[in-house]
Amino acid sequence: MQPIQYRPASSHRDRTRTSFRRTHPDYSAYLDSQESPPRLRRLGYHSLDEESDLCSTSNSREQFVNVSTLACPTSAGISPPYSLLNGGSDAPSSSTLNKESEEPACTSSMESPTAHASCYFSGHPTVFPAEEFDPSKDAANIYKAIKCSAHSVFSILKEIECDLTRSGYGNFEVMVILSLEYLQDTVAFALNEYIMGLDTDENILIQGLVPYPNSFMQEVAQSYRKQFSADVIIDLFRHKRGDFRTILMALLQGVRKESAALSMEEMCEDADILHKASEIPLSPNAEVFTRILTQRSFGQIKEIAQCYQEKYEISLEQCIKNGKFGGYKSTLIAIVRYATCKDDLLAEWFHKSIQETATNDWALMQLTLGRSEIDLQDIKKAYRRKYGKPLIKAIASATSGDYKRFLTAMVGY
């Protein structure tokens, strides 16, 4: 395995490196006034800190949100993406892992919108919070392991993080540092790499945004501001172009109706809208796909995809493949597949990240750390069903050393 030499720990990124601050000295005025550039507002987007009221309508049918008038609440601090699971009533005990259980069925959004929201953002993890968490005891164990003073424990961790910004540490060291950070910090860092035009795999961004709830999007935006003193929406708008930029901005707005209910008639109407938009050659129909697939709940998108298949005898996924390109196409397909077969999609992402010819270590780390406290146990079952062998063996065959031991410990047997 080759060490990662181009991705330092995100929390020690030099904020002055942000190209927007260097090339746009008037950026602070935008932050102080909390106003979006006029062209940005006309496109229907706003600064994530902007406060306003939800758009109102007299139509009884649930309307799409106009994100230019949406208030995005902020939370006090950054919390892990798996905070939905930690301490929740639906968090499984360790004994649950000994029982074979099928993937929880996502019910229709008309029957139980809350149930299907939980289905998409929770599951059976492989890593659990300690029942009797004692940070002092854990620090003492680290002290014994590395045989140094308690103060040196923190100094060593800090030194490793700083060194990662200067030289290429191995995958194990990178994995350790990322495990000490929040996933939001890692995704925010990847977004900045993409915005600056550095060598960033678009799939890293897709995998870091699509499978997570609105609260996670808001925390990514907060982390981005904390690390780079910039608004991620405005940075994307100023430095990127195309439909992929547009859908990233829409996802980061965090306006998906996670627990809303629609009738079957309304969801079939959305299917008709998507079909009509896809039929017109060279039409600017990206806005239609972006609006529906980033604002409808995953349960609703599943019903829309089923209705589309029944009415037009072609899958919604195939329709997207026929008419879209690049990262935008990959994002739309990821959204549809996450709605229709969540665990299979995540298993496929794991499989692609551990191809023996070219292991994508950053994707593998992000997936393992991001899903281990949410639904990695479910993904393991899907992986075995799809590829005929355990995920842990696939990872072990593609990695080595302490890096392999760290990953397999998180994945579990």
Image (spheres, rainbow, N blue to C red):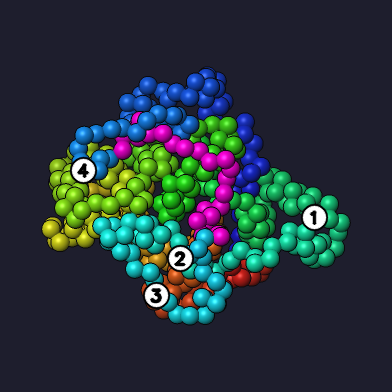
Q: Is residue 83 magenta?
A: yes
Name the residue tied to disc 4: 61
Marks 1 and 3 in Cβ contact (< 8 Å): no
Instruction: Return the x and y of residue 149 as percentages of the image width and height.
Output: 86, 56
Between disc 1 and disc 2, the foreground one is 2
Name the residue tied to disc 2: 123
- Disc number placed over residue 122 in the picture, else none: none
Instruction: Return the x and y of residue 35 as percentages of the image width and height.
Output: 45, 23
Instruction: Return the x and y of residue 289 as percentages of the image width and height.
Output: 26, 45
Name the residue tied to disc 3: 102
Amino acid at circle 4? Arg
Name the residue tied to disc 1: 153
Q: Is residue 306 magenta?
A: no
Q: Earlier in the sequence, mark 3 or mark 4?
A: 4
Amino acid at circle 3? Glu
Q: Which stretch is magenta?
A: 65-87
Residue at 48% across, 77% down = 390
Q: Earlier in the sequence, mark 3 or mark 2?
A: 3
